[in-house]
Amino acid sequence: MMGRTVAVLMCFSLGMVFGEQRASIEANPIRKVVTMLQKMQARVQEEAKKEEALFEKFMCYCKTSGGDLEAAMKEATSKLGSLEAAIKSAKERKVQTEADLKEHMTSRAEAKQAMAAATAIREKEAAAFAAEKEEADTNLAALAKAITAIENGMAGGFLQTTAATSLRKFIMFKAELPDETRQEALSFLSGKVGEDYAPKSGQITGILKQMEEEMAKGLEEATTAETDAIKNYEALMTAKKKEVETLTAQIEEEQTR
């Protein structure tokens, strides 16, 4: 019984104490302000720490990103310079390509003109040689017949042939003979022979044989010249065709640039 009384008295005493303290706190406005300020200070310090942490992150970002940005700017500047150089180089190549194209087209036209001119000259030379050879063959055949006829004592029969007429025209207009020799040959071919023909037949034969030899030599030289001209023409045409093909390939490439 006694113990219960003590316990009740103690609880009552504690209640009285806490009640007095609460009343004291509620009755002290300065304490309330101090408590509020302490809480505000705690919040401010906490927010300051957070802001400091954010600031440090920001500064770190600025340092890192600033370096990257500077590097990017330098790279962009370098690329810009390279691009300007590339544009300048492209313009220069375009100008050079246009100049090369013009030059190559002119060269190709000149090569084709040279081929056409060479072909025209070759055709004229070939025609001239053909005519010269035909005449030489005819005259050589006539000389051979005349010489055979004189040596066989059949000059009279030969003088009635067309070969004699052709030979007479050649000696009269084209043969390179002294006037006296020319006159003797023409007298023979005209049939103006008499009793003194026999002694002179040897002389006439000699004249005709000399003419035959010189004419054969001339024809041989003309044939050699014609052969050389053909070779030179073919070599020229081969070279010019190759030149035209090369120039055409260059022109086609330049036109696609």
Image (spheres, rainbow, N blue to C red):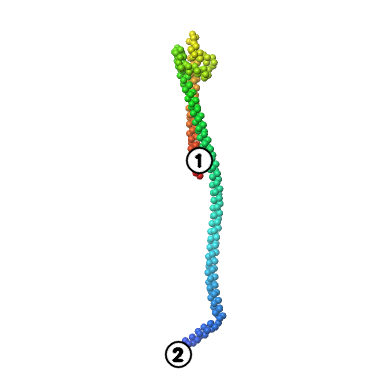
Quadrant of the image occupied by residue 94: top right
Return the residue nearer the eye: 85 or 170.
170
Tell me the residue at 50%/30% (across/down): 120
Q: Mark 2 or mark 1: name the one nearer the start of the chain.
A: 2
Give the residue furthest to the top. Answer: 195
Q: Is residue 243 above or below residue 27?
A: above
Crowd class of label 2 (few under 14; some 14 to 19; many from 20; radius 10 Å): few
Give the residue furthest to the left. Answer: 1
Tell me the residue at 55%/46% (across/down): 91
Q: Element type at marker 1?
A: helix
Residue annotated with mark 1: 251
Amino acid type, residue under disc 2 in the picture: Thr
| Residue 143: % across, % down | 47, 17
Amino acid type, residue under disc 1 in the picture: Ile
Residue annotated with mark 2: 5
Return the residue nearer the eye: 45 or 136.
136
Q: Are marks 2 and 1 in contact (CB under 8 Å)?
A: no
Tell me the residue at 50%/22% (across/down): 218
Q: Can residue 15 be seen from the camera position used here?
A: yes
Q: Can residue 14 be seen from the camera position used here?
A: no
Quadrant of the image occupied by residue 29: bottom right
Task: Kindly identify which numbered label has been placed on residue 84.
Answer: none
Q: Element type at marker 2?
A: helix
Return the residue nearer the eye: 101 or 217.
101
Q: How many marks?
A: 2
Q: Is residue 233 above or below residue 154?
A: below
* C-alpha separation, residue under disc 2 versus residue under disc 1: 128 Å
| Residue 122: % across, % down | 49, 29
Q: Is residue 169 above or below residue 11?
A: above
